[in-house]
Amino acid sequence: MRNPLVVGPRVYLRALEAADAETNAAQSNAETETFMYRGRAPASPISFARWVEDDGKHALPSSIHLAVCLRDGDHYIGSVTLHQVDYLNRTAETGSGLADGFRGQGLGTEAKMLLLEYAFERLHLHAINSHVFEQNSRSAAALKKQGYRPAGRRKWDDVKGGVYCDGLLFDLLRDEWLAAREAWRATLPAEE
Amino acid sequence: MSVPYLTGKLVGLRALTLADAAHAAAWARGPLPINATRAEAFLKETHTDPWNPRRRYLAMVRVGDGEIVGGAAVSGANGRTGKLDVWAAPWFSPEEGDRLCADAVRVAVPWLRDDNELMTVTFAVPADAAATIRAAEDLGMVLGATFREHVARPGGRVDLLEYQALNSGWTIPVIEEASGA
């Protein structure tokens, strides 16, 4: 593992490096899904490198992006993020994205659990929130599995499929995350 | 620099100027200190596009003497949706600040929803800001979400309520189901 910050059974989180820019751009350009973003667009490694560079400038950044890497081989497979980190109210919004080919294997849930561990146990945040477009039922189901509770709905949030769609809003408190993590851990194969 | 269409009973909203750098404690959000040098740099960094800034910062000024008593910010996407934030200067009591913010909401929401014809205006308010909540509801804003315990208060926490003003002038197209024929 290289420069690990939070470590799980199969993946770990670390700071993004300038060297991730090429991989990040390549993964973004290979995206097969359209439902979870505001639309795909060709991505340049130049802008990813700048994004990584800017990310490291602030002592207390408003967004914290972490690379998700496989423990086996250190392969960079995506990123998880705390957006709008509010150090006074101790809240943040979570976001995550794994490259095509790494979804549907439980790696995203593990990465999210590590991000929440970082948020609640390292930054000592009190509450977390998240947002998905209403068509993104897969992410909504994942959030519920991770302990998030429905907080409400943001009307006419964006355009998907030619119609305005709502955003579904969720929130999460530490105790709820701890319970969800216990339930998730119980599903993992026992260590030998 | 006052803006007639953004003037309420207690406060008005106006654009910031470099002369306001010396009063940043009032219009810069949060409890942290910001000196005039840093404030001037912030104003120059954030005021690069007069027409469509990513985030438009405004001064909240008291009607009568024009003293800066808070701030506001509007951000949005594609000229279709907007997010409004308002806050009072840190020296006001919570009740005084709530009254000022309520008046600012009363002028800002019609400006964004009716004048700028935004489809939605989203506004988050702590659950203990009774006057501001009343102003939002009087304007027809609807409660869309409750984020539990999202606001820190001395000795405790309160929920954060997200309201939306929905512009009835926008119509939602209904897509006919494919017949499959």
Image (cartoon, coloured by chain):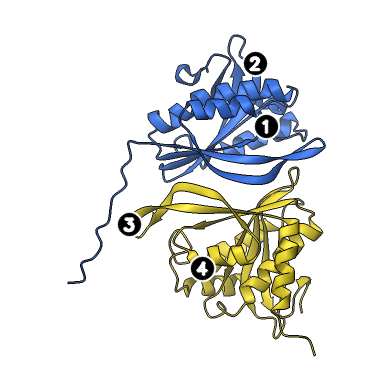
Chain colours: A yellow, B blue
- Nearer the observer: mark 3 or 2; the answer is 3
The answer to whether A111 appears left or right of A141 in the picture is right
Separation of disc 3 and disc 2 at Cα? Answer: 47 Å
Separation of disc 4 and disc 2 at Cα? Answer: 51 Å
Percent x, y for residue A126? Answer: 75, 51
- Going by the numbered disc 1, the residue's amino acid type is Asp
- Residue occupying image coordinates x 31% and y 43%: B171
Q: Residue furthest left?
A: B181
Q: Which mark is residue A162?
A: 3
Question: Are the residues flagged by discs 4 and 1 in contact, CB closer than 8 Å?
Answer: no
Q: Which mark is residue B1?
A: none
Separation of disc 1 and disc 3 at Cα? Answer: 39 Å
Say yes or no: labels 1 and 2 on the same chain.
Answer: yes
Q: Which mark is residue A138?
A: 4
The residue where tag 2 is placed is: B67
- Residue occupying image coordinates x 70% and y 22%: B95
- Going by the numbered disc 2, the residue's amino acid type is Glu
Q: Which corner quadrant of the image does residue A135 belong to?
A: bottom left
Q: Chain of mark 3?
A: A
Q: Tell me: residue B28, above or below residue A66.
A: above
Q: Which mark is residue B128?
A: 1
